[in-house]
Amino acid sequence: MNKVKLKDIAISQTGPFGSQLHESDYVEEGTPIVTVEHLGETSFTHQNLPYVSEKDRDRLSKYILREGDIVFSRVGSVDRNTYVSLEEDGWLFSGRCIRVRVDKSKAVPKYISFYFRQKVFKEMMLNISVGATMPSLNTKLMDDIPLTLPNLLIQEKVASVLSALDDKIELNNRINAELEQMSKTLYDYWFVQFDFPNETGKPYKSSGGKMVYNQVVKREIPEGWEVQVFSDWIKETKAGDWGKGIEEGNYTERVYCVRGADINGLNGKGEVKAPQRFILKNNLSKALKPNDFIIEISGGSPTQSTGRIALLTNKTFERFDTDVICSNFCKAISLKDEKYIFNFQQEWQRLYNAGVFFGYEGKTSGIKNFLFDSFVNSCKVVLPPKDIVEQYYNIAQHLDEKKQINLQQNQELAQLRDWLLPMLMNGQVKVSDNYNIESDDILIAAEPDVCYGDTEHLDIPSNRKGFARQVLAGKVVSVFKDDPNFSNIKFQKIQFLAEHIIEADLNQNYYYQAAGPYDNAFMKSIYGHFKTQKWFDSQNQRFVPLTKEEKIEGYYQGYFAPAQVRLDRLFNLLYQTTEAEAEIIATIYAVWNNRIIQGKSISDNELIEDFYKWSDRKQQYTRDQILVGLKWLRDNNLEPKGFGKLIKKAKGK
């Protein structure tokens, strides 16, 4: 592994500023320009791209993108970056972006793009950015970014493995887009153009089927068809709920709460990050069922109306481990006849795409609200006969099941990719020497001491991180409460090591303290949280279980199951340590991790020097004790990887 700076392998360049390119230069057709808004996690979003003329493209030729370039956001979300594919070769990039062009003789561009997608790298980008009100980057900051890279052959192999996973996800997305288009095309053909199969299997209207002019919808419809409003199809509506962030009082029922922001994810266009909430037992009647719809009734934007819709199928509920409700900004509905669900979905979406919903919006305190009752009671819908609807239902359901299978596979592939990514980058997992880049098979050989799941990604919603951290602390106390060496100091050090070993971003805020890394606000509040949750009471420096201690394990499995093997191993190792040994190990880990984050050199002598500089208290430990702590970390494959924030001295210290 070679340590380099980005400027050693690539050239960074800022896009054209306003003096070179104005919005007035944009045209309806021409060469696309990538802006910050179009940067995605794995590829560009190609919606609403601005264009410039061929003349301006030639004028701005030094800002043309080539396949293999990597585009960063220069301001705001500076951790966002996207790899330029062959499809985008020849596009331009805007002044709010920075282009990184890798020298292919020194590094593999695709490998570098995956390197930039690591969570630890993204956190580093946010840390090195400048700006008092909004994070920003410049080429000097980019040039000095430290990288640790293997040789070119290994880079090729790693990039090939990870690209194969991305390619399969992208293929599934394209297949799903085709499946959706097939369902929509068939709907339009049968229920908009009225060319559904007649008695002989021929297109009804095109084959001379009788049409009757309807005064209500102001057009011809097939003879015998009715005209209704959406409310005629609806059996019941369910209001949203928000409950509490933690279990308290009568708010005891854990649920997932789907918001408007999750609707695209439910439809397979992004992630679902519905937060966990606790609601009243009586409100479990709001729990959603298969074939219910969720509709966004508050939110939207100037270019996006309210009224977005998502259908929840049996497959949808497999993404959740408990009941699902919708938030107060949404409404759920059930139909009288479930055979009409795909007709209802397609007709609603057709009107949404046509901009009809902008005409059914009101405003309250600056927030747009969908006038649901007004819409469903006034918008006219042509009601097809049941036999034709059932034919469409059977076809649409089959297409939807295929789509849901692909979405499930994408979720598994993304989890595999995100699990492999950091380990392939740091050499913890290697690609087999027998791996053939041209083959579809993914063969991976792990280092001997690495067990499956070592760095499994924990997808904990931001508004649940505080509670998840309490749960992890509760698990630590459950494991160590009978350990004769378990003191307040050892508790702090175990919590620190657990969060860092599993790379759990739980809003930690560690600073120097004489005994090692210490999060003052967390340690001052955790005992109160334990009592509030009725998990533990602290008496004479010992923990006494309370009535709801057994609930910790359920929460722990919900948040930390992917990291359980690694945490169990860590807890088992630390159970055998004294308070002093735990302090030495945690402090050595902290100074070592700091050096990785800072991009500094790392040697035993430098780590020992940093250890003694930590505080005067550290003088009580011998050099041999520190070396034993270092050996303990290495022997147990627990070396730091540069996760988290740089630990600093608290102000006034």
Image (tube, rainbow, N blue to C red):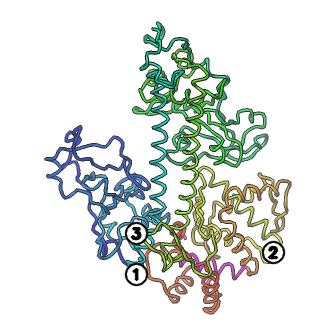
Q: Which residues are magenta?
A: 579-592
- Please determine whether, in this image, residue 49 is positioned above or below residue 628: above
Report helix, strand or loop for mark 3.
helix
> 321 or 348, which is in the foreground?
348
The label number, if any, that marks residue 111 in the structure image? 3
Give the Cα distance between marks 3 and 1: 14 Å
Is 448 within the magenta?
A: no
The label number, if any, that marks residue 483 in the structure image? 2
Residue 492 at x, y = what percent?
Answer: 68, 69
Q: Amino acid at mark 3?
A: Tyr
Pointer 1 local density, CA inside 10 Å: few below 14, some 14–19, many at least 20: few
The residue under the point 52% across, 66% down is 645
Q: Is residue 181 visible?
A: yes
> 389 or 277, which is in the foreground?
389
Q: In the rendered structure, which disc, 2 or 1, sits on the residue that comes first in sequence?
A: 1
Q: Is there a contact, CB below 8 Å, between mark 3 and mark 2?
A: no
Question: Is 274 displayed left or right of 28 in the figure?
Answer: right
Q: Amino acid at mark 1?
A: Asn
* Residue carrying label 1: 2
Quadrant assignment for the N terminus? bottom left
The residue under the point 74% across, 63% down is 475
Q: Amino acid at mark 2?
A: Asp
Q: Main secondary structure of the magenta part?
A: helix
